Image (cartoon, coloured by chain):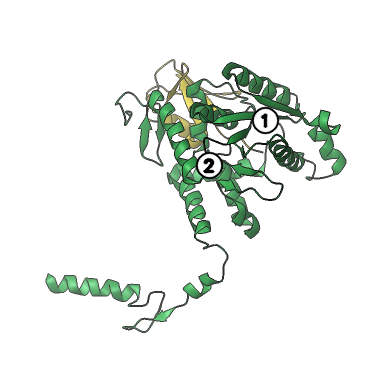
Chain colours: A green, B yellow
Amino acid sequence: MKCRKCGAKASVNMRQHKLALCKEHYLEWVPEQTERFIKKYEMFTHHEKILVAVSGGKDSLALWDILTRLGYEADGLYLGLGIDGGINYSHESQRLTERFADEHHLKLHVVDIEKEYGQPIPVLSEISHRGHGKPCAVCGLAKRHEMNRIARDLGYDVLATGHNLDDEAAVLFGNTLSWSSEYLLRQGPVLPASDGLARKVKPLCRFYEREMTAYSLARGIEYIYEECPFAEGSQSIYYKELLNQLETARPGAKLTFYLRFLEARKQGDLFIEKNMERAHLHSCPKCGQPTSTDDLCSFCRMMEKVNSASTIA
Amino acid sequence: MVKLVLRNKEYEVKAGMTLLSALQKINVLPESVIATREGEMILDVEILKDGDVIKLIAVISGG
């Protein structure tokens, strides 16, 4: 398979876009697309100060790398969660994040949860009895709280996270299974600022997780490969695996699922009464059966075509 | 033979098949990994040669 741009051997094939690219052109294509999404969803401008939430994982480091390559003023925020799990998880992810910042001469804020609040995340979880024996709920809550606090206190215009399309599709899938309308109406590439809450953006929300891994590998970004010890068996990973089964059989299914949702949300097509009116049925003037169109029903339209084709023949 | 390595697991398949066939054989979803050979990314259509060692990099992260 050859690169669509130069004809050299392709390194990345994106079946959902019917696009294969060599390493060099892939490394150009990703920032170009990111810039396109930043503009399309009006995430931020080159005059704004961005705080990138960096975990040491592939997505957040790739996002920081891309924004820097695009010339944005983007500083990093690393939150030390105090998770060990027998693999020194937090320590290693902090080391990799600091190394990336040093190598690229970037400004990194480090906030250690234990130093700030007296206990690491797993202990806070135990003490507070939140999250059914797993610290993930407390971790998510603490991260959202701290990211917003730092963005607000240090005067950043916007907080950027490395959520990719698989993250977004998995959340959407979960919220759709439970018809969590409030969450569905809030999900999107941009969460506007409101009283005391910084604007939140997800510039990578249209890239597959696989594409961000390919970007990090091609760029030589060293990220923490080990999974968070508490993520094993998580619902989000299960949903991602299900969606990947669908994607394997139907290339583009994940992208369509997410984009059609954004479209429906933007047009106000989710959870509103007017949809009920729109769904009102009329009688077909020919056969009298109910139809959603004002004119002939689909069957009568088809038969008209069949009859006219037969007449011509 | 061709060796495929995914995290701490190793698999062996016969040479001459495509990467896609090899992944199907070892029950790994192509969407969930990136394959590299000698540090370079390879595509599903690549024919695997005798002695190849293919490192499969898991792409899913969560939590």
Helix or strand or loop: what does disc 2 sit on?
Answer: loop
How far across and down, in percent of the image, does residue A101 sit? 62, 21
- For the residues labelled 2 and 1, say whether their Cβ atoms are less than 8 Å apart: no
* Quarter holding residue A28: top left
Tell me if A20 is positioned left or right of A211 in this view: left
Instruction: Kindly tell me whether residue B58 is visible in this rendering.
Output: no
Disc with the residue nearer the chain's start (2 vs 1)? 1
Both on one chain, marks 2 and 1? yes
How far across and down, in percent of the image, does residue A300 sit? 30, 76
Instruction: Give the residue number, with chain letter if any, for mark 1.
Output: A77
| Disc 2 residue type (three-letter) | Cys
Instruction: Kindly tell me whether residue A137 is visible in this rendering.
Output: yes
Instruction: Give the residue number, with chain letter if any, for mark 2.
Output: A205
Q: Please, which residue is most extreme toward the left here?
A: A313
- Identify the residue shown where x is 67% and y is 41%: A234
Q: Residues within 10 Å of mark 1 (few under 14, many from 20)?
A: many
| Disc 1 residue type (three-letter) | Leu
How far across and down, in percent of the image, does residue A133 sit? 80, 42
- Identify the residue shown where x is 49% and y is 51%: A257
| Chain letter for the residue marked with disc 1 in the picture | A
For the residue pair A100 and A131, the one nearer the viewer reads as A100
* Quarter holding residue A202: top right
| Quarter of the image with the N terminus of chain A in it | top left
Tell me if A212 is positioned left or right of A191 in this view: left
Q: Is residue B44 above or below residue A290?
A: above
* Res A311 label: none
| Chain letter for the residue marked with disc 2 in the picture | A
For the residue pair B62 and A36, the one nearer the viewer reads as A36
